[in-house]
Amino acid sequence: ATVGVEEACSGVRSLISCVFAGFFFSATLVRRPASRAAVILLAAPLALAMNFFRSLALTLLANSGIRIAGLWHDATGFAVLGLTAILLAAVALLIERRPARVEPAVVREPDATASHVSQTYPPYVPASSASPRRLLAGALMMAAALAAFFFFNTRPSPRHDRPAPDLASFLPAQAGGWKVETSPDLYRFASTLQTDDLAQRTYSRDTDQGVEVVTIYLAYWEPGQASVSLVASHTPDACWPGAGWEAVPVPVPRARLALASRVLADAEVRAFRSGLFPQNVWYWHVYDGRPLAHENPNSPVELLRLAVRYGFRRSGDQLFVRVSSNRDWDSIRRAPFIEALFAKLQPLGL
C-alpha cells in the first residue's frame, strides 16, 4: 500500500492543541515556575512523538490490507489527542509531586504555678489541595467521555456504499433557446476542494430585459473524502469575496424555493455584485442525504454549532449545489434545465 500525508493532516492542529494543554496543566497542576516551564516545553516534543506513533500505526494497518481512511484515521487522531493530554497531565503531576513537610513537634513546658503536666502535640502535616490520583482519574474520565463523543460522531453512515453520481449528466448539454457553456478550467480547484467530482455549466439567452444568465455548479464528495466543516468552508460567503465579488445584504438568508412540480428543501440565499453585474445565489449543502443549514457563516456560535454536530463526521457522502443568476428565482425556476436538474438531485437529498 502507498500511504501519504496530506497538507491538512500535517499535525499542526495537534501540536497547537497540545501546547494549549501544556499551558492549561501548568496553570492548574503545577505551582513552581521552573516546573511550569518544563511542562510547557515538553508539550511540543510529546505531540510530535505521539503523531509519529499514530502515522506508524496507520501505515502498519495499511500494510496489512486494512483501509485506513475514515474511521481508523479519525479514531486514531482523536485517541492520540486524548492520550497526549493524559500523558502531559501525568508528567505535570510527577514534576509537582513533593514529600509533605512535617512540622517539628510542639512541646509545652510545665508552668510552675499550674498543676498540668507536659503535653506533646502530634506533628502537623498540611492537607493536600487535590489528590494526584483523583486528578488523574478525572482526566481518564474526561478522555473516555471524549472518546465516546467522537465515536458516535464518526460512526459509519448507512449510505457509505453509495456510488458516486455522474454530475455532468445532471446538467443538460443542450437547452432550447439557451446557449450552453461548460467551464473548462473547473478542475484546477480540485486539490483545494479535495474532490474531482465537479461540474459547472452556464446557460444564457437574450431577452427584452437584456441577457439572462444562469450558472449551475455541482460538487460531490464520497464518504470519508472530506469533513463537513471543510465542505462548508467553500461556500460563496467564503470564496466569492476573494474573487472580486462584493456581498450585498439580503433580507432573508434562507428560503424555501418552489418548482413547477414540488417545493425544494430550504436553500441558503445570498447576493453579490461585481461592478454593475448583480448575481443572486442559491445553494444547498447536503450531508448523508440531509440538507444542512448555514444560518450565519460569520457567527462564531453558528460555526461552533455546525462543528459540534457535523464537523467531525466524514462517513457520509456530501453534495454541494449552487445556482446563480442575474435574475430572481421566479424568473428562472421554469427553465427546463432547472426542473431536470432537481429531478435528478431528488434521490441525493434535494
Image (cartoon, rainbow, N blue to C red):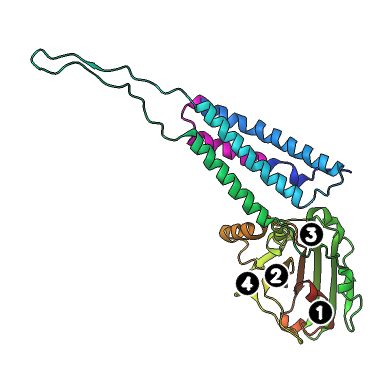
Mark 2 is on which residue type?
Answer: Pro
Q: Indicate the position of residue 340 as horizontal and vertical percent values.
A: 84, 80
Q: Which residue is mark 2?
A: 291
138 or 330, nearer to the observer: 138
- In x, y percent, where is residue 257? 70, 80
**Mark 1 highlights which residue?**
343
Q: Nearer the viewer, mark 4 or mark 2?
A: 2
Identify whether 299 is placed above or below 262: above
Is 140 left or right of 331, judged from the image as shown? left
Tell me the SS state at disc 3: loop
Amino acid type indicated by mark 1: Ala
**Which numbered dot is residue 223?**
3
Looking at the rendered structure, the secondary structure element under dot 1 is helix
Query: What stretch of residues is rendered in magenta?
Result: 14-34
Whether the magenta-drawn stretch holds residue 324 is answered as: no
Q: Can you say whether 244 is above or below 264 in the image?
A: above
Of callouts 4 and 2, which one flags the residue occurring earlier in the amino acid sequence?
4
Circle 4 SS class? loop
Amino acid tagged 4: Pro
Residue at the (72%, 67%) spot, across then down: 285
Q: Is residue 250 left or right of residue 182?
A: left
Type of secondary structure dominating the magenta stretch: helix
**Magenta stretch: includes residue 21:** yes
